[in-house]
Image (cartoon, helix red, strand yellow):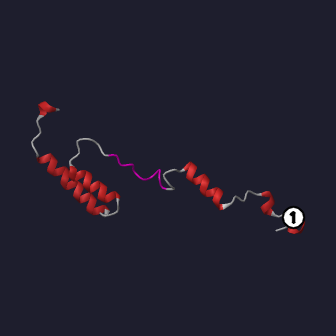
Amino acid sequence: MGHDSSAGDSMRDWYDAPQITDLFEEQARLLPEGPSGYICPKVEIAEGLPEEVISIVSRYWEGKVATMEFANAIETLRLRHLEKPVNLLEQ
């Protein structure tokens, strides 16, 4: 392509060619949650959630429950909670 590397004037002398370790360090600094950290939800346990809900979320997060199983379980728990009478005076 017209580049003569015999005199040391190769393309790598003119263009950025970082070391892989430098790339990993930069990635760790700029993306502390990893490459998909910005698209993965952050789960925080809120007070007042039933233990069953916390358990299913934890198991899902650990990869012990598949997505559809999680969705079905969480919907079942939500509907079960809604079926309980609500005291409007306590809200």
The residue drawn where x is 34% and y is 57% is 61
Instruction: Name which quarter of the figure residue 18 lies in.
Output: bottom right
The residue type indicated by label 1 comes to Gly
Which residue is tagged 1? 8
50 up-or-down from 63: above or below: above
- Nearer the observer, 91 or 18: 18
Measuring from the top left, give residue 32's x and y in whole percent.
Answer: 51, 50
Q: 22 left or right of 35?
A: right
State the extent of the magenta-drawn residues as a range.
Answer: 36-44
Residue 37 highlighted magenta (yes or no): yes
Measuring from the top left, give residue 6's x and y in whole percent.
Answer: 89, 69
Q: 3 left or right of 64?
A: right
View extreme (left): residue: 85
Residue 27 highlighted magenta (yes or no): no
Task: Give the dominant element type of the magenta stretch: helix, strand or loop.
Answer: loop
The residue drawn where x is 11% and y is 36% is 87
83 up-or-down from 72: above or below: above
